[in-house]
Image (tube, coloured by chain):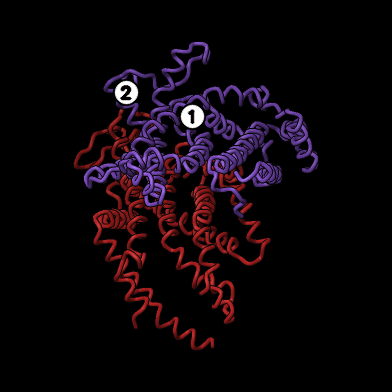
Chain colours: A red, B purple
Amino acid sequence: MTNRSRSVYARKRSPWRSIGIVMRSVWARGTGKFSLIVLAIWLVVSLVSLFWTPHSLWATDGYHVWSSPSRAHWLGTDGTGADIASWLMAGAGVDLLIAVLTVVVALAIGLLLTACMVARSTVLSRGSVVLIDALISIPTILVALMLAVPFGASVGVIVAACGLSYGLNMARVCRPQALRVANSSFVESARHSGVGAWRVFMRHVVPNIRSVMMVQLSLSAGTAVLAEAGLTYLGVGVPSGVPSWGHSLATSAKFITVYPLTVVWIGGCVTIAVIALNLLGDALRDASDPLTNPALRQVDYGA
Amino acid sequence: MASSQTLTRYVARRILLLLVALVAVSLVIFLAIRVLPGDVAVVMAGTDASPAQVSALRAQLGLDEPLWRQYVAWIGGVLQGDFGTALVSGQSVAAIVADRASITFPLILAGLMIALALGVPLGCAAAVTTRKRARGIYQAVSIVGGAVPALWAGLLLIMLFGRGTGLVGVFPTQGFPQNGWHSFGAAMLSLVLPAVTVGIVVGASMMRYTRSSLIEVASSDVIAMAMACGMTRTSAMIRVGLRLALPQLVSVIGLTFAEMITGVMVIENLFALPGIGTGLVTDIGNRDLVAVQSELLMLAALFLLIGIVVDVLHKVLDPRLGEDHD
């Protein structure tokens, strides 16, 4: 039985092909196109900043502090005469890292909790619901502060706090759909033909909650970038000296009353990135649902 | 509600759960501060303290006693309403928190009012409109509003309306009057910009929730029935749909309120308001472990309590949730 079922799965599942179809139909939407372009720029800028920035991050110029945008300094300089554009580019990398890591942690925690919630064992299913109910009302910032007391400010604190909160949130949002699938007849028949619980979860439950998950995850990525800005401003996020958008925003915030314009670029940059992430979630949901995207149906039933 | 008995049982179970959760949270807070790296006494005594001074400080803090005894002493005090004495200022933690809450809670309430005044009508309009262009504009408003960092929104408002430097310098941007609410007018004025900042950021999410919960009920038979009885689609959505969406909205408002207690931290910091959030950050910076552990516990208890109130309200407001859903 195992041989046959495996070959059927192997023929039906063509992940690369369906990813291509989904991406193309995201690209076909105006909002999807916008977010893909912004995210591509973000990625390229982050990669470039690893090797090259217009000025060194640590090159300060005491004679040209708070200069306005010019050819030498695209976005002007800050209070120490450091180039704002360079810091923004380097910050893009750190923020991208934070967003990606947060998504990974949230996905792991969310999947684990969802698996527990649909498990047959009542201890697991009851226990996980209770756990989520109890923890969901504790906000991200508080978790980050609790972690920052012993560990100090670090990227890890942001990722852990955001990943935990968004993972809990994802599990709660996914629960109704996951339960519906877990109680369906196709899951029952798979169980009866001897497929293991974890395999059923990955093969049957996860694909059916994928669209809900993707929206949640891309919202999480956006929220993580916002949380980074807030936490870094409070001094419990990215440690000082490490470039990040929150860091740039915080440094310019101190002198807002004297040099207001620098803050416009930095905040605008964060806002556009977060908009792109939020829009990507919606576009992905519509594009990856076989009910709204007919091209995907051929992959599922054909060949 | 099917019967008040089920409700009572539900509340009893949630409160039992709350107690268990509180014990767990208090243990986590306690251990996080004590066990993980960094000797608190060394940090507090400063870099130029002699070993004798450090050990004297440890004895004074009770840090040389076994962990379980420290924990019991702390929790025993908390149960009697004694949250300890802050190490830096020497005041009782309860008094300090009460002082800070008198700034944070008015700020949250004002922010929430602005958020609701902006978000609910906009959300209704976005759900009801049938014109394509209007829908696009509403969507753009909600997406941009949801992506703006609170810090940036505050900074932009300062640039526009801050006294002294703003384009239309009207409102003070830094601090709270020395004698607090005794100078009522000045206190209110200093809360205007922070409250509007909070209101804009939270209002965008209120708008999203209102719109999505209205759209959820839009396709239900209830709306069709109301329209069959002669209501227009718009009035059916507003008068019937909004009532149906109410329980969900109340849940969201409750949870938002809880989240705002720490969520306004950044705003408090920006406008130099000595509220709960700013105070917590200061205490953490000072390594004032007595104040930090009690404040964290109070906040956690408050959040858990709000969680229960929200869930109970949801059940009371939505008569369709008669039986337990577990």
The residue sitting at 36% across, 42% down in the picture is: B237
Query: Can you see residue B22?
Result: no
* Residue carrying label 1: B108
**What is the x, y in percent for residue B133?**
21, 45
Mark 1 falls within which chain? B
* Residue B161: numbered disc: 2
User: Circle 2: is it few (<14), some (14-19), or many (20+) Cα within 10 Å?
Assistant: some
Name the secondary structure under disc 1: helix
Q: Is residue B216 above or below residue B95?
A: below
Same chain? Circles 1 and 2: yes
Total numbered circles: 2
**What is the x, y in percent for residue A297?**
33, 73
Looking at the image, residue A215 sits to the left or right of residue A151; the answer is left
Query: Which sits in the foreground, A3 or B172?
Result: A3
Which one is in front in this view, the residue at disc 1 or the one at disc 2? 1
The residue sitting at 41% across, 48% down in the picture is: B222
Query: Which sits in the foreground, B24 or A303?
Result: A303
Mark 2 falls within which chain? B
Looking at the image, residue B261 sits to the left or right of residue A34; the answer is right
**What is the x, y in percent for residue A35?**
29, 54
Q: Tell me the distance, in whole angstroms, between the alpha carbons under discs 1 and 2.
A: 20 Å
User: Circle 1: is it few (<14), some (14-19), or many (20+) Cα within 10 Å?
Assistant: many
Mark 1 and mark 2 lie on one chain; the one further toward the N terminus is 1
The kind of residue tagged 2 is: Phe
**What is the x, y in percent for residue B296?**
62, 37
Quadrant of the image containing the C terminus of chain A: bottom left
Q: Is residue B228 above or below residue A234?
A: below
Q: Is residue A74 above or below residue A67?
A: below
